[in-house]
Image (cartoon, rainbow, N blue to C red):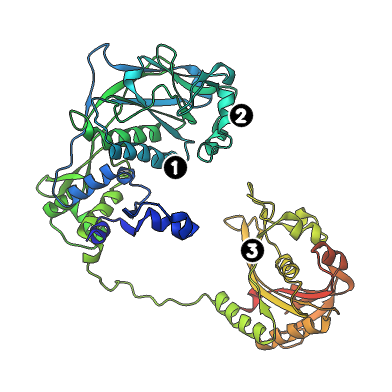
Amino acid sequence: EFDELCFEFGLELDEITSEKDIISKEKGEEKAKGASDVVLYKIDVPANRYDLLCLEGLVRGLQVFKERINLPRFEKIIPAEGEGQRLIVTEQTAQIRPHAVAAVLRNITFTKDRYDSFIDLQEKLHQNICRKRALVAIGTHDLDTITGPFTFTAKAPSEIKFKPLNQSKEYTASQIMDLYRTDSHLRHYLHLIENKPRYPVIYDSNGVVLSMPPIINGDHTKISLKTRNVFIECTGTDITKAKIVLDIMVTMFSEYCEKPFTVEAVEVVHPNGKTHIYPELAYRTEKVKPEYINKKVGISETPSSLAKLLTRMCLKSHVTGNGNHLEIEIPPTRADIIHACDIVEDAAIAYGYNNIQMVIPKTYTIANQLPLNKLTELLRLDLAAAGFTEALTFALCSQEDIADKLGTDISATNAVIIANPKTAEFQVARTTLLPGLLKTIAANRKMPLPLKLFEISDIVVKDPNADVGAKNYRHLCAIYYNKSPGFEIIHGLLDRVMQVLDVPPNEENGYTIKAAEGTAFFPGRCAEVFVKGQSIGKLGVVHPDVITKFELTMPCSVLEINIEPFV
């Protein structure tokens, strides 16, 4: 039942498992001994629905969907003059993490489960919308252990000293960096600030450190099950994301406050003196025509039933203006509603994808294989029949594979170069299929000789006339590797390819080969292939230098031609 409910709501119940099952799958049954047998539901939540990332939000969403409860109204309480909390942002933060927002959850009651969920939600948001804390970092503190106003500033690492969360003594910021360099969880965030001259830090009015975002909170303000008042701060480089994260944190957990769904606002003072009240908890209304929704989804519902569908998806809606408009209220939990199409999507989910009638499309088209791919498929069969084995190699390779190792300069290859390659193996898009096959042979040297390989794939070269600045060509490359070069075998393969393509061996309307030179080929053992007067590639014996550079020991011959002229 729950699986079906998830599907109707646009989620997926991934699997029903337990900690024991997970550990035994990953590490074997021995390690799983003593692990919990409690049933766990793994639920796949789409990346745009931050409001479903914790149990509170998920249950609330499903209850509203099942029409058991109405969507709660979130309320921001602005304290009397001089009584509220303030967060003062100094100009030192501008260079490193310029934005900060904050809020207070008053008189909250934590239990073990609520507390775990509270910490878990922060972690999920950090990984997802916060981009591993690069855009936003969340800090939550026990307000009763500190006194405002709070200051968000940036200082030299040697000037910051505090006791980090769950540690027993004080460290300076530089020592903290060294301390966490080996920490499996926190080491991934150190790079965000470690090379900066100043580190961001938040103090209270007595100089107590709340946190050093985005790395670690102070131990002093640690939240426990007894905590009654929580101060939440989000600092970051992206103010929009910071506001969304703060809204999600407070809307999810304000239901445990003494006055449910209320949040106490915090005043944030910017370096230029302007003040802002957070959280924004902004409600806004959108107008959408019912026929727009019906047309896009392919249904024909009345405006009032569409309004009901949307209300079930936490988008409170009603019909206005003699039934020709829907007015939809977007709550602060739904930062993912950016455009009318997002509203249409929710209407479709509530209507039920399986309930939408299937119709035959009005336009009747017949799909067909791309002629170039069809030719490729036919040639692959014939090359295999000729005794060659197909290889599939990477479309990216290193610069030397296509230049130095083949005896040419990288500028002469006209290759497309990748700006920020992850490894040296993937620096450029290949301009020839030869290096891939030579590397394949190098990896299979222990196989019995002869090795006969081929590949038919795309190569990429720069082309200033193409709309994207580069162009693909479908190449056929075959290689013969044995104790003797076997030029005649490769030449025979060329003749066979031309035979199956129905290209006769003559100059006017067929193919010919003429002696040529190529840096990758043995002098005097290289020929260029011409079809109807235009050059389509080369064949020949590979130069000994090339063979040694690819760590091979035997001679080999290759053929590489462009097959696009034959389509």
**Viewer-side residue, 67 vs 161:** 161
- Residue 178 on image: x %, y %: 60, 30
Q: Residue at x 72, y 71 (%)?
A: 444
**Viewer-side residue, 497 vs 502:** 497
- Residue 37 on image: x %, y %: 34, 55
Q: Residue at x 19, y 55 (%)?
A: 291
CB under 8 Å between discs 1 and 2: no
Residue type for callout 1: Gln
Between the C-alphas of marks 2 and 3, the distance is 36 Å
Compared to residue 381, the image places residue 215 above or below, namely above
**Viewer-side residue, 510 vs 462:** 462
Q: In terms of image quadrants, where is residue 202?
A: top left
Q: Earlier in the sequence, mark 2 or mark 3?
A: 2
Q: In terms of image quadrants, where is residue 82?
A: top left
> What is the residue that sits farthest to the right in this orientation?
524
CB under 8 Å between discs 3 and 1: no
Q: What is the crowding at mark 1: few (fewer than 14 residues within 10 Å), some, or many (at least 20)?
A: few
Q: Secondary structure at mark 3?
A: loop
Residue type for callout 2: Asn
**Viewer-side residue, 73 vs 560:** 73
Residue on which disc 3 sits? 394
- Residue 101 on image: x %, y %: 37, 26
Nearer the camera: disc 3 or disc 1 = 1
Residue 172 visible, this angle: yes
Residue type for callout 3: Phe
Residue on which disc 2 sits? 195
Q: Residue at x 36, y 47 (%)?
A: 48
- Residue 274 on image: x %, y %: 37, 17
Residue on which disc 1 sits? 127
Q: Earlier in the sequence, mark 1 or mark 2?
A: 1
CB under 8 Å between discs 2 and 3: no
